[in-house]
Image (spheres, rainbow, N blue to C red):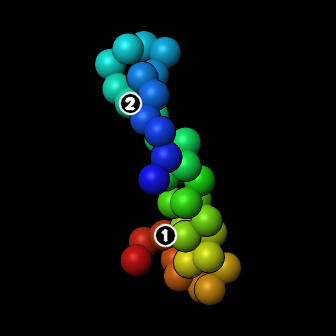
Amino acid sequence: MGQEEISASGTSYLNRTEAANVEKIVTTFLRSGVVPSQ
């Protein structure tokens, strides 16, 4: 998948590709009528 990069704070890692994919999935769920409490 995507390249991991260290965060500005130096305490965690970022994976922008993974984050973008999660955003797409969550958006699809919300548009399909899934509510956040589920």
Q: In the rendered view of the protein, which quadrant contains the C terminus?
A: bottom left
Mark 2 neighbour class, 10 Å CA radius: few under 14, some 14 to 19, many 20 or more: few
Question: Who's the residue at 45% across and 28% down the image?
Answer: 5
Mark toward the viewer: 1 or 2:
2
Q: Which residue is mark 1?
A: 36
- Above or below, comparing residue 26 to residue 14 in the picture: below
Q: Quadrant of residue 29?
A: bottom right
Measure how far apart labels 1 and 2 are at the Cα level: 26 Å
Looking at this rendering, what residue extends furthest in the left direction? 11
- Above or below, comparing residue 28 to residue 1 in the picture: below
Of the numbered discs 1 and 2, the one sitting upstream in the chain is: 2
Residue 12 image offset from top left, x and y in percent = 35, 26
- Above or below, comparing residue 36 to residue 12 in the picture: below
Residue 9 image offset from top left, x and y in percent = 42, 13
Per the rendering, the mark at residue 13 is: 2
Q: Nearer the viewer, residue 12 or 37?
A: 12
23 to the left or right of 10: right
Type of the residue with mark 2? Tyr
Question: Who's the residue at 62% across and 86% down the image?
Answer: 32
**Disc 2 element:** strand
Type of the residue with mark 1? Pro
Question: Who's the residue at 49% across and 15% down the image?
Answer: 8
**Disc 1 element:** loop
